[in-house]
Image (cartoon, helix red, strand yellow):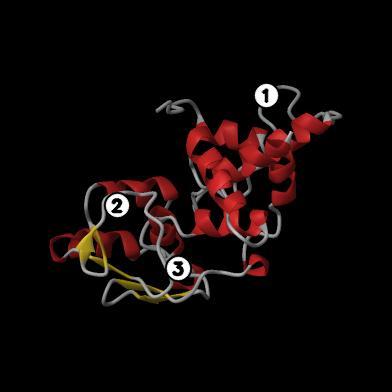
């Protein structure tokens, strides 16, 4: 699978990603595109507008083009609002749940924590970051990893955890209570543009 190894902050700025998956940098980075003429106003074509929104959402959740396309087609095959289902699936990713709960400072770190086998879902080790968590699932930390996760948790604000999960920092436990509603997710996302992008 192709993996981008260049300067991610520059890439994020080019697509207007405000959640840079790094709580330490969000407030300090400029929100204009990178480069000498990054702040210049440019009239985008309809295609560019649709593409940029798709890239914005994809980069926020740090998924590849192939993964993102799979999520879209799965969402389109389900009953309901395709855009909302797409965002809900991305929110249900295990690496994203670990990040949202404050068990990692960045989504990249959350992915590494899952990959290295530190996380249990309903008592069973899951080392696949793309694993989709379901309502009622309980995510815990392996006993041998408790000290490491404790050191990660200390500098992170506990208030960052969203309302659709219950986080017990002392027990290092996350209960995914329910799937979030659209109004609880990022209001800046224009998922309808993503649907139009794939519909062409």
Picture residue at 77% right of the left edge, 36% below the top: 49
Give residue 114's mark.
2
Q: Give percent across and percent down for residue 16.
A: 68, 41
SS class, disc 2: helix
Q: Is residue 9 left or right of residue 14?
A: left
Contact, CB < 8 Å: mark 2 with mark 3? no
Give residue 108's mark.
none
Picture residue at 45% right of the left edge, 68% below the top: 157
Residue 40 position by quadrant = top right
Judged by depth in the image, the label closer to the viewer, 1 or 2, is: 2
SS class, disc 3: loop
Of the numbered discs 1 and 2, the one sitting upstream in the chain is: 1
Q: CA distance from mark 1 to mark 2?
A: 35 Å
- Quarter of the rendering occupied by the C terminus: top right
SS class, disc 1: loop
Q: Is 124 drawn above or below residue 22 in the view shown?
A: below
Q: Is 164 drawn above or below residue 55 in the view shown?
A: below
Q: Is 85 drawn above or below residue 43 in the view shown?
A: below
Judged by depth in the image, the label closer to the viewer, 2 or 3, is: 2
**Residue at label 3?**
157
Q: Give percent across and percent down for residue 144.
A: 13, 61
- Quarter of the rendering occupied by the N terminus: top left
Q: Give percent across and percent down for residue 119.
A: 26, 59
Q: Is residue 58 left or right of residue 2?
A: right
Q: Is residue 129 left or right of residue 27?
A: left
Picture residue at 61% right of the left edge, 45% below the top: 57
**Residue at label 1?**
35
């Amino acid at each position: 699978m192709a993996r981008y190894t260049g300067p991610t902050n520059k890439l994020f700025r080019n697509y207007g990603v405000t959640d840079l998956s790094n709580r330490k940098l969000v407030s300090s980075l400029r929100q204009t595109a990178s480069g000498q003429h990054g702040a210049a106003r440019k009239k985008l074509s309809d295609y560019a507008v649709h593409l940029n929104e798709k890239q914005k959402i994809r980069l926020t959740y740090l998924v590849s083009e192939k993964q993102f396309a799979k999520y879209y087609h799965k969402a389109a095959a389900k009953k309901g609002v395709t855009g909302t289902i797409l965002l809900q699936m991305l929110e249900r990713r295990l690496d994203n749940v670990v990040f949202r709960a404050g068990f990692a400072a960045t989504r990249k770190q959350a992915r590494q924590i899952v990959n290295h086998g530190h996380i249990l879902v309903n008592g069973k080790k899951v080392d696949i970051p793309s694993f989709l968590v379901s309502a009622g699932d309980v995510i815990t930390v392996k006993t041998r990893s408790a000290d490491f996760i404790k050191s990660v948790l200390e500098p992170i604000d506990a208030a960052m955890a969203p309302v659709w999960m219950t986080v017990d920092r002392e027990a290092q436990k996350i209960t995914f209570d329910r799937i979030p509603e659209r109004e609880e997710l990022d209001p800046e996302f224009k998922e309808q543009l993503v649907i139009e992008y794939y519909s062409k």
